[in-house]
Amino acid sequence: MAADEIRGAAQGSAPVPLSVLDLVTVGAGRTASDALRTSVDLARLAEARGFHRYWVAEHHSMPGVASSSPAVILAHLAAHTDRIRLGSGGVMLPNHAPLVIAEQFGTLEAMAPGRIDLGLGRAPGTDGATAAALRRTDRLGEGADDFPQQLAELTRFLDDDFPDGHPYRRIHAVPGPVQATSPGGVQSPHRPPVWLLGSSGFSARLAGVLGLPFAFAHHFSAQNTIPALDLYRESFQPSAVLAEPYALIGVSALAADEEKEARRQVLAAALGMVRLRTGRPGLVPTPEEAEAHEFSPMERDFVDSWNANVIHGTPDEVRSGLDDLAKRTGADELMITANAHSGDVRVRSYELIADAYGLPTPA
């Protein structure tokens, strides 16, 4: 696998490649169809302005997040883009049979050759009850504990290289390499690169030991970012995939034409997080609802803590914050997620960030 399927190139004056993480958020008064139309608009914008990759994340049972089926969304985005890398940030592997994921991403690779990333996480992407429904078991810890074995199985299916005598030796993920070995068969040279995602040290260490690229969820686990990246780099062993470590971090950032408007937008998103964290998940509230909300002292503390890790303000302020974060962490890539009630606000934020860094403009 060529390293350029993993490593990006910084554009404009950006310190590192910039990418997009899309949660397909649904605002109050909007529909999932509205959110998915925004995703298409945003993917086209990201491609036109030189963002390196565009990932969607698996979540379940959250009314305000319409990304329960990453493979379906990615197929839709592949049909509306031509060049940008598309991927999962990530698929929660314990929720699925490895063969199913290999088939889904083999299909995506056939749709968009050389453009697909397979990012994998070990968390459920939801609450325990929903995870039990997904996995048809309430023994959830076993799925996380078995993650290395599940990963190994998935990789075998992607490469079609189970050893002789293995019970899955005669089982093949299609589309996949087996097609090249059939009479008259021709197969794409590309295979989706596997990334490991994490918000703690477990996946950081595993990614390092396996020589895989690593994506850290700085946007909701900021205190663990530098320790996890250090652990990844210390654990890294060169592989056929990478000769040197490559780590991106997810970061919440929202730019607006005026600082006051950025503060209004991130307050609304933070109110949505308050409700999610207290067992009341819903649609992303409007800024007006957030301004009228009477926050309890505990809620206010949470909002202040949450928004301290959201880079927001004018384009220049956001650029400065992203530059500082890249310098502090040494991240090889920044993957920006913008959580706001309105799709238009989210699209505008990425436009402003692109302008602030002088990213390419469409011909």
Image (cartoon, grey):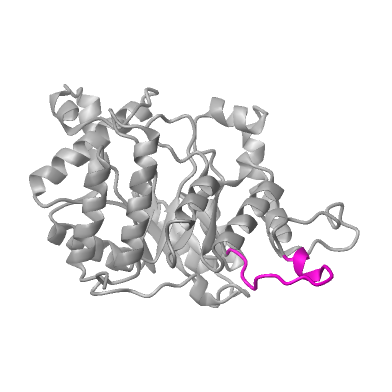
Is residue 68 shown above or below 170? above
Residue toward you, 165 or 179: 179
**In the rendered view, would you say 283 is above or below 106?**
above
For the residue pair 34 and 290, the one nearer the viewer reads as 34
Q: Residue at x 17, y 23 (%)?
A: 293
Residue 233 in view: yes
The C terminus lies in quadrant: bottom left
Residue 329 falls left or right of residue 216 = left
Identified at 21% across, 68% down, the residue is 357
Q: Main secondary structure of the magenta part?
A: loop
Quadrant in which the N terminus appears: bottom right
Residue at the image point whose x is 25% and y is 61% from the top: 322
Q: Is residue 243 above or below residue 118?
A: below
For this orientation, the residue located farthest to the right is: 165
> Does 337 appear above or below 319?
above
- Within the image, what quadrant is residue 182 found in? bottom right
**Magenta-highlighted residues:** 177-192
Asked whether 75 or 190 is in front, the reply is 75
Q: What x and y, as percent, mark residue 320?
A: 18, 63
Is 80 positioned to the left or the right of 180 in the image? left
> Is residue 250 something one can see in this rendering?
no
Taking the magenta stretch, the answer to whether it contains residue 189 is: yes
- Residue 188 or residue 241, whichever sits in front: 188
Where is residue 296 shown, x and y percent of the image?
A: 20, 22
What x and y, as percent, mark residue 249? 39, 58
In the displayed structure image, the side of residue 44 where residue 89 appears, left or right: right
Give the residue at x 84% y 63%: 163
Q: Is residue 7 magenta?
A: no
> Along the horizontal axis of the image, is 292 left or right of 89?
left
